[in-house]
Amino acid sequence: MTLEIFKHIYFRLPILIRLFLTILVVMVLFGTIIHFIEPEQFPTIFDGVWWAVVTGATVGYGDYVPLTTVGRLIGIVLILTGGGLLTFYITQFAASTVQHENDLSQGKVAYKGENHIILIGWNERTRILMDTILKKDPKAEIVLIDQTLSQMSYRHFPIHFIHGDPTDDYFLQKANIQKATKVVISGDNHKNEKQSDNQSILTVVAVRGNNEFIPIIVEIMTMNQVDNAVRAGASTILRPNDFMSALLYQEVFKSREKPFETVIHLLKKQQFQHFKTPAKFINQPFIEVLYEMKQKNHLLLGILREEEWIFNPSHDFVINEDDILITSIPWQT
């Protein structure tokens, strides 16, 4: 290996590794020298290396001590050189640890894990979603990509933060998009609805370009952008304006009830399932299917028939072969 190749490799190593290798070479060198100068006092090279490390660290156990003048001169040189190297190494190690923590909080560190959920966009909805996921599964791995936050402390929010533009492939790859299980794209509260939807759709395009099969859940504020989100590759489209308008309607005209709280607690305790009608339920009345499914802890809410949502039909409503059953089951199952 030529000197230029060595310099090319050595000076591109991380500083901690360079320092460690330098210290290792220095200690082995001094240990070897002292072994050959005083072989009776230092029977093996390892004994010499042990003395070099202990002396360089200024610990000084005294189990191995040079007796000759030359040996002691070597010890002096070792203390002046090796001690400084070890002190510098410890200082750099502490500084690197602090710097790494700062880089994590500032979103500069790439994520190396797998099977994680990627949240794009930080707002109150995202925060509540994060809390809900971690409450259900404390071991869940979550990566947040956002360009409006300057930093996020891991001690306060136990997720991996990446600061950057989610429409840029570079930041998606830093989030290890290829190994993620789901992506949730939240609307940008800092923009108007049209701009927010355009940003969300562009993000969907970028995500789909980096991972062909990953499920993408995206918030779309305006109805005229829903088709564009589908074309871009979104798997699930949430329309928060429609949802909130329906709740507001319930609140206005059903003042004695609490529809908002009811829906929130329902979603926290239950999950919805859609599936095709089993053969045994074809041409059966709704009430009989409801009773039989309840035996398995499934609550039959209604059906989806030819794009028409039918909830709480009459007891003698007949289930057809092509119907999609809409049920509710506890999260624990």
Image (spheres, grey):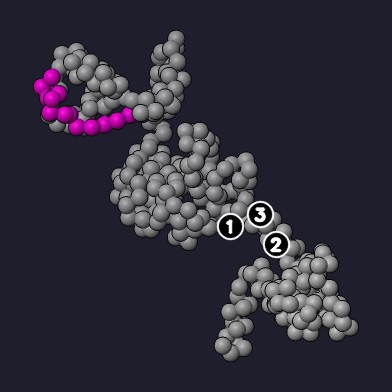
Where residue 277 sits, quadrant-wise, is top left
Q: Which residue is mark 2?
A: 93
Q: CA distance from mark 3 to mark 2?
A: 14 Å
From this viewpoint, is residue 105 visible? yes
Q: Which amino acid, mark 1?
A: Lys
Pick whichever of labels 1 and 3 is earlier in the sequence: 3
Compare residues 149 and 60 and report the one nearer the observer: 60
Q: Residue at x 23, y 15 (%)?
A: 291
Position of residue 116 relative to residue 27, above or below, is above
Q: Which residue is mark 3?
A: 102
Q: CA distance from mark 1 to mark 2?
A: 19 Å
Where residue 28 sits, quadrant-wise, is bottom right
Q: Quadrant of the C terminus?
A: top left
Q: Residue at x 44, y 24 (%)?
A: 264
Compare residues 204 and 161 and report the one nearer the observer: 161
**Helix or strand or loop: what does disc 1 sit on?**
loop
Pick whichever of labels 1 and 2 is earlier in the sequence: 2
Asked if residue 120 lies left or right of residue 311, the reply is right
Q: Which residue is mark 1?
A: 108
- The crowding category of the residue bearing disc 3, from other C-alpha atoms within 10 Å (few below 14, some 14 to 19, many at least 20), is some
Q: Is residue 274 magenta?
A: yes
Q: Position of residue 116 (x, y in %)?
A: 45, 47
**Helix or strand or loop: what does disc 3 sit on?**
helix
> Which region is colored magenta?
271-284
Asked if residue 203 lies left or right of residue 13, the reply is left
Q: Which amino acid, mark 2?
A: Phe
Nearest to viewer (mark 1 / mark 2): 2
Pick whichever of labels 3 and 2 is earlier in the sequence: 2
